[in-house]
Amino acid sequence: MVTLDFRSDTVTLPTPEMMEAVRTAELGDAARGDDPTASKLEAVAAELTGKEAALFTPSGTMANLSALLTHVGPGQEVIVEERAHIFNSEAGGISAVAGAIPRALKGETGILDPDDVKAAIRTAVSDHVAPTGLICLENTLNSAGGTILPLQRMSEIHDVAQEAGLPVHLDGARVFNAAAALSCPVADICRFADSVMFALSKGLGAPVGSILAGSRDFIARAHRKARMLGGGMRQVGLIAAPALVALQDPYPHLCRDHALARQLAEGLAAIDESLVRLETVQTNIVNCFVDRFAADARDIVAGLRAHGVLANCAATKIRFVTHRHIDGTSVESCLAAVERVLGATRRAA
Ligand SMILES: Cc1ncc(COP(=O)(O)O)c(C=O)c1O
């Protein structure tokens, strides 16, 4: 049986073109600034994000953490949305390593309200408070189902930050998906942030790595932090080369991933309309709510696995993500498996 893997866009394997780029990459000791392929990737990434400089890191978590360490010191507050990846899913590094205090605000469908951000900013007027040092945004919003943080909202929050003299960091792990959905250059999104992280190994399809981009001075300081975290790499052109291929023309396949997610969501809604909130399916993620069918989504996910479909599971929610190895036939097979598993669950109830 063929296994269809909808767990994440991180599961893709390198294309033959990427493997060829690995074979022919020019290499050197990147920790000495001697790897021409890594330097090229950083230059391309800086240009795409509209920033002065960029740093190639092995993971998004390391890029986010390097940004936190560069923007804030121990005892400073960082404003985040309460479902943000940087707060919930990066092993607590924001506090454990950066020593910062996350101030988690509830945003509607993950989207922070600029007035709430303004009200939450604390300046060091009193010895009693931990002053705010940074505002973190995320685009697309992973936990909300790959929804887009609207540019108008980013701009308003950026204005609030500027008035308070605070930097904004963008966790843009899937910012290329946002750009594809909005039909705009990535730089148009990144201009509302002082620093941005984006993942090469998610929708873009490279095997390893993320980028941190910002001003030349910021990246020079972040370099030191990444080094401290163990991110000083050597002949890293081996993984920068496929990333350069991934950045060549990413939009057609990202748009295709989005159309497949839409096809999947509409198919799920046709099975039972309580399964999806169609308005939240804006990029390559489909959150599927199975509370009507099972107390525990894990039972449904186990059933799907028996039919050769892998999906991600959280409480009553199942997450399907489309990517380069998924096509229209995979989506149809997935829908057929969902129908069979939900039907069996209904009969057993
Ligand atoms: C929104 C977001 N930020 C950051 C990360 C962390 O990236 P990595 O897994 O490369 O550390 C992820 C990973 O899924 C993510 O979805």
Image: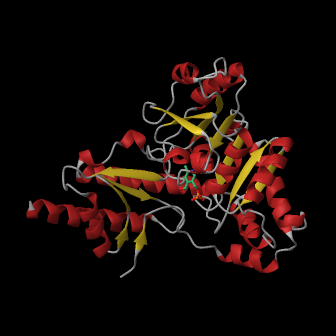
What percent of the width, then of the height, locates residue 14?
A: 63, 73
- Where is residue 94 shown, x and y percent of the image? 59, 46
| Residue at position x 63%, y 18% in the image | 126
Percent x, y of residue 210 = 68, 57
Q: Nearer the viewer, residue 21 or 217?
A: 217
Query: In what quadrant does ligand 1 lie?
Result: bottom right
Q: Residue at x 57, y 27 (%)?
A: 153
| Residue 92 in the image, given as x and y percentages of width and height | 53, 50
Residue 154 occupies which quadrant of the picture?
top right
- Is 321 or 104 nearer to us in this picture? 104
Residue lying farthest to the front in this orientation? 127
In this rendering, position of residue 50 left or right of residue 333? right
Work out whether residue 339 or residue 135 is closer to the camera in this orientation and state it.
135
| Horizontal side of residue 299 vs 33, given as left or right | left
In the rendered image, the vertical position of residue 115 relative to residue 139, given as above or below? above
Q: Name above or below for residue 119 compared with residue 143.
A: above
- Horizontal side, residue 313 vs residue 236: left or right: left
Q: Is residue 348 left or right of residue 157?
A: left
Q: Quadrant of the N terminus?
A: bottom left
The residue at the point 78 percent across, 41 percent down is 50
Snapshot quadrant of residue 3: bottom left
